[in-house]
Amino acid sequence: MRYRKREKKDMIKQDNLQIYYPGDLQDALLLYNKRPEAILTAGSVELSRTETWQHYQGPVIVLGNIREIKRIIKTERYLEIGAGKALSAILSIPSPNIPLLLKKSILLGCPAPARTQATIGGNLCIPDKTYDIHGALTLLNATAEIRKTNHTRWIPVSDIRNTTGFTTLEEGEILTRIRIPISNWEIQEYIKFPGAFTTASINLYGLAHKEDNLISAIRISIKTPYNPPYRYPETEKSMIGKSSPLTKHEITQITKEIAEKVSEEEPEADIRTITKLISHFLQKI
């Protein structure tokens, strides 16, 4: 499916589909409120790789021309990224200003040719798929602004999806921006098995900070192929104050504890691979 560039018209018809090109965010919100059955898209990467066009007859709202959702703002407290910002543009943010964990999740999760069109909001809001960026932003405690015609709310990125992996956005709501707290994480690790760009993968996200060779903060998340990321706050809490590097015995015990919790939540998970990923991360602390 090919789109024509929007010029003077706000809506065109192509292959019996109504395709709308709102010029600003308010227009998009009003239109989506009137046509909640519409598909929202910005870069159209996901739509281009599915059979949606062969079966879908409803309207499409293209958000790619809206400047308000393409801004990047950096303050002392947070980095704010518009939901319509392309992944390639996010990667161009100078390294000290973009969390390495987010950068790694983009590099390993999205092939280079798609990054110029794929957006951070699109990656988060695909109805039935959880992509790599979601786990990274969740571990970074990022929040999301959700807009409706008469209402705005901020939620943790982790709440964009429910426990089954589907989006929780309500009818007429549009994700408009992501806010990432500025934190000094000394260790930021992302491991993807079996490798880059695979969809049915096991992903480990890890953050750690040390002070005087003691672990002062740590976060660990595991994402299995068919479930959203899991966090292990009790295990993380038990690691605070431990000496760095961890002993082999401590690594074995912590790895076993997390692996057992994963097995309880998902009995069919590949525990052997998960154990290797956890151990690999813990050895870097």
Image (cartoon, rainbow, N blue to C red):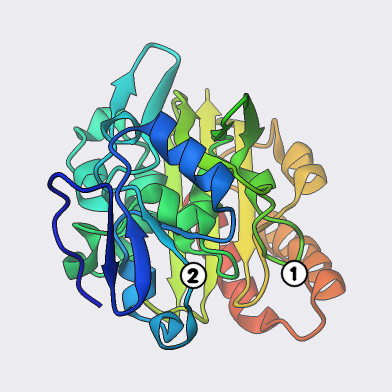
- State the image quarter where residue 59 is shown: bottom left
- Distance from disc 1 to disc 2, alpha carbons, whole Å, reads 44 Å
Which of 146 and 272 lies nearest the eye of the viewer?
146
Q: Is residue 132 left or right of residue 14?
A: right
Label 1, residues with CA under 10 Å away: few <14, some 14-19, many ≥20 = many
Label disc, if present, on residue 259 of the rendered structure:
1
In the image: residue 86, left or right of residue 257: left
Which amino acid, mark 2?
A: Gly
Tell me where residue 74 appears, x and y as whole percent.
32, 19
Q: Quadrant of the N terminus?
A: bottom left
Residue at disc 2, secondary structure: loop
Q: Is residue 207 visible?
A: no
Q: Can the viewer see residue 93 in this picture?
A: yes
Q: Which mark is residue 58?
A: 2
For mark 1, give the secondary structure. Answer: helix
- Disc marking residue 69: none
For residue 253, above or below residue 81: below
